[in-house]
Amino acid sequence: MSAMPCLRQLSLGSDGVPAYLLPAEASLYSKPDLLRSAHLYPALKSIIENSVVPSELGLNEELRNLGRVVDDELSKP
């Protein structure tokens, strides 16, 4: 199977229900056959098209610490 049909199939899932994956190909956001079943892709594109990857010294440690705080709060009776 070539890349584009495979990406389309992964985006729709085996049962035809959209998985709303971040497409590896920008052209998938405008494929009519995909959009018929996964009509939220244009909205997803508008949300992420100008996004940037967060980068900061010590970011991983900070996120782990925040995760511990969330875990602690969620485990309280």
Image: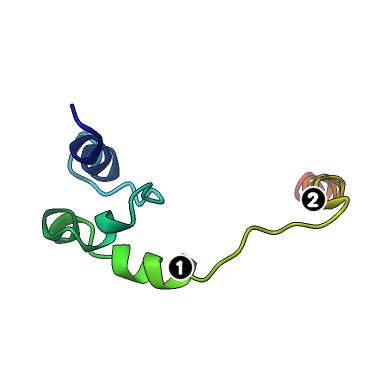
Q: Mark 1 points at which residue?
A: 49
Q: Which of marks 2 and 1 is in front?
A: 1
Tell whether 1 sits left or right of 61. left
| Amino acid type at mark 1 | Glu
- Decide which of 62, 46 is in the foreground and name it: 46
- The residue drawn where x is 29% and y is 65% is 40
**Coloring scheme used:** rainbow
Tell me: residue 58, above or below residue 15: below
Quadrant where the N terminus is found in the figure: top left
Q: Image point 88% across, 50% down: which residue?
A: 58
The x and y percentages for residue 74 are 75, 49
Amino acid identity at mark 2:
Leu
Say which of 70 and 39 sits in front.
Answer: 39
Q: What element carries label 1?
A: loop
- For mark 2, give the secondary structure: helix
Where is residue 23? Give x, y as percent.
36, 50
Q: In this view, does 77 lie to the left or right of 46?
A: right
Image vertical order of residue 49 relative to residue 19, above or below: below
| Mark 1 closeness class: few <14, some 14–19, many ≥20 residues within 10 Å | few
In the picture, measured across the screen, residue 46 lies left or right of residue 15, that is right
Q: Mark 2 points at which residue?
A: 63
Query: Residue 48 location in percent, x, y?
Result: 48, 66
